């Protein structure tokens, strides 16, 4: 046993976590090395603090709602916002894109358990005709934006330990979907050990810890630790357009949103949509003690979620969070490297583990706790955070569940509605149901058009125009 190994084992013993090495003697030399290296990754002091505050004293705290009020936000011109302020914001954003200050950033380290898909979620096929995957949709949007603003974009993609190699291999296999590989950067997020309800770190097998990704909020420290922030600085990038891997409708690069962020001197900006109904599972943008916060749907009492403005009848807490942000590079550094940092959240989960004899256990109910960081917890630390409205139909249709709401089927229908709207706005008759969904399949590549404006430009240039029939695919006009 090396001195390092004995020091690590001793640290676990004195932290009351000696069970981690219960099967050490049975392991092969290679498996021992792996276990020790996983154990060395864990910050035992952090785990101890989390066990004391989140596991042992669970239920002791309820969320502090004192002084909470709904957050104001910049309304779209179509819902009463100032059209000239939006035009100014867009000009600022476009200038930033032309000068190459902006990079795209996707968090793709999640486990996608609800979807029940074993590959990296970004490889999931989502489009209606060609069945292109999420990563391809984003790649084409970024290519198109790079072409439009005359500056190819850098794309930072956060993976997890579990899906890193598979994600990189997928991009290699697909030649980065036409993007310059030197501008596509992958880095892994951190991971955290799961504990049982008494605070003991769980083993996933005799020779490995039950480790899982540290949440999308782990992106801030991973950006710093991986060197991504330094790379951005050397490339003159100071602004990150942040989006999740599961939402193909997202405007990956939205000049107006970027412009609002820059013009306001914001360190972290957010998009909002009005909640569709009171119990919709979106976080709520609120102000508390002068700070912008997101209160999760599970934390805001239902009577507050149902409160309505007596005059307009709109929900008081209507500003829903859709996990789209613009973030300042140096703000990320401050959050990652400065004191304090984001708070961890507790999630009770079924965690595969081993029993005292070392036999595998597949629990049928929650048997432990995972710790996760949420990126929106950075908002109260940001200077001048701005919340900007967006049209749900053009920005948000996530694939979370295998069936029902936010599933591949609802997302495909939302894509079809969007393509049909663009065609109609270009003067083409498309038969749809009352929800605007065409009763046939069609698909528009982002390289043809990624919003009503770019679609219209490409469509007007197209000669002869194709017949709008089932299976129509409008692809790259640049080829
Ligand atoms: P979700 O909260 O939907 O979690 O992630 P998930 O892990 O993908 O799915 P479930 O809950 O297991 O079904 C929202 C976004 O945050 C990313 C996901 O990849 C997705 O883009 N994420 C989440 C990370 O990058 N890392 C994490 O640790 C968690």
Image (spheres, rainbow, N blue to C red):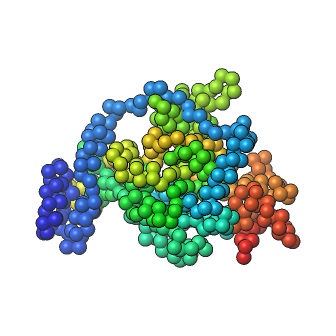
Classify residue 4 by image quadrant.
bottom left
Residue 207 visible from this viewpoint: no
Residue 57 placement, left or right of 470:
left
* 69 to 328, vertically: above or below: above
Identify which residue is drawn at 44% across, 26% down: 66
Identify which residue is drawn at 27% across, 48% down: 46
Instruction: List x then y, in percent, for residue 382.
Output: 47, 43
Instruction: List x then y, in percent, for residue 322.
Output: 57, 46
* 63 to 43, vertically: above or below: above
Identify which residue is drawn at 71% across, 39% down: 82
Identify which residue is drawn at 51% across, 76% down: 172
Where, quadrant-wise, is the C terminus in this rendering?
A: bottom right
Query: Nearest the camera: 424 or 461?
Result: 461
Classify residue 276 by image quadrant.
top right
Residue 62 visible from this viewpoint: yes
Query: Nearest the camera: 124 or 171?
Result: 171
Classify residue 279 by image quadrant.
top right
Query: Nearest the camera: 378 or 405?
Result: 378
Residue farthest along the top direction in this orientation: 310
Query: Nearest the camera: 63 or 368?
Result: 63
Instruction: List x then y, in percent, for residue 321.
Output: 55, 43
| Total marks in image | 0
Instruction: List x then y, in percent, for residue 224.
Output: 40, 58
Where, quadrant-wise, is the N terminus in this rendering?
A: bottom left
């Amino acid at each position: 046993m090396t001195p390092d190994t004995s020091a690590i084992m001793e640290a676990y013993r004195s932290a009351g976590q000696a069970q981690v090495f219960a099967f050490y003697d049975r392991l092969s030399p290679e498996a021992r090395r792996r276990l020790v290296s996983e154990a060395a990754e864990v910050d035992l002091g952090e785990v101890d603090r989390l066990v004391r505050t989140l596991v042992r004293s669970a239920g002791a705290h309820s969320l502090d709602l004192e002084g909470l009020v709904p957050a104001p936000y910049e309304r779209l011109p179509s819902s009463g916002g100032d059209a000239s302020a939006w035009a100014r914001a867009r000009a600022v954003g476009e200038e930033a894109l032309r000068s190459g200050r902006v990079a795209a950033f996707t968090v793709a380290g999640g486990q996608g358990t609800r979807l029940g898909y074993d590959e990296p979620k970004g490889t999931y096929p989502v489009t209606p005709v060609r069945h292109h995957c999420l990563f391809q949709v984003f790649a084409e949007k970024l290519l198109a934006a790079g072409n439009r603003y005359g500056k190819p974009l850098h794309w930072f993609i956060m993976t997890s330990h579990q899906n890193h190699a598979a994600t990189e291999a997928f991009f290699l296999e697909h030649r980065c979907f036409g993007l310059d590989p030197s501008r596509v950067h992958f880095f892994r997020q951190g991971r955290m050990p799961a504990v049982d309800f008494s605070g003991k770190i769980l083993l996933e097998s005799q020779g490995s810890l039950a480790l899982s990704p540290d949440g999308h909020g782990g992106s801030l420290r991973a950006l710093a630790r991986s060197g991504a922030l330094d790379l951005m600085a050397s490339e003159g990038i100071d602004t990150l357009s942040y989006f999740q891997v599961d939402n193909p409708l997202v405007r990956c690069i939205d000049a107006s949103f970027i412009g609002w962020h820059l013009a306001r001197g914001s360190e972290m900006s957010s998009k909002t949509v009005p909640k569709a109904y009171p119990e919709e599972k979106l976080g709520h943008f609120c102000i508390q003690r002068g700070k912008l916060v997101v209160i999760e749907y599970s934390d805001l009492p239902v009577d507050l979620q149902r409160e309505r403005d007596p005059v307009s009848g709109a929900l008081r807490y209507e500003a829903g969070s859709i996990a789209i942000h613009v973030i300042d590079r140096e703000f990320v550094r401050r959050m990652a490297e400065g004191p304090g940092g984001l708070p961890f959240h507790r999630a009770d989960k079924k965690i595969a583990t081993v029993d005292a004899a070392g036999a595998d256990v597949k629990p049928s109910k929650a048997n432990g706790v995972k710790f996760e960081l949420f990126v929106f917890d950075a908002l109260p630390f940001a200077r001048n955070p701005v919340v900007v409205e967006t049209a749900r139909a053009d920005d948000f249709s996530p694939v979370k569940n295998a069936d029902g709401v936010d599933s591949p089927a609802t997302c495909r229908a939302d894509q079809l509605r969007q393509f049909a709207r663009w065609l109609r706005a270009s003067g083409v008759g498309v038969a749809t149901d009352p929800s605007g969904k065409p009763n046939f399949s069609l698909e528009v590549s982002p390289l043809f058009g990624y919003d009503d404006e770019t679609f219209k430009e490409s469509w007007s240039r197209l000669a002869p125009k194709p017949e709008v029939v089932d299976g129509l695919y409008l692809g790259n006009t640049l080829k």
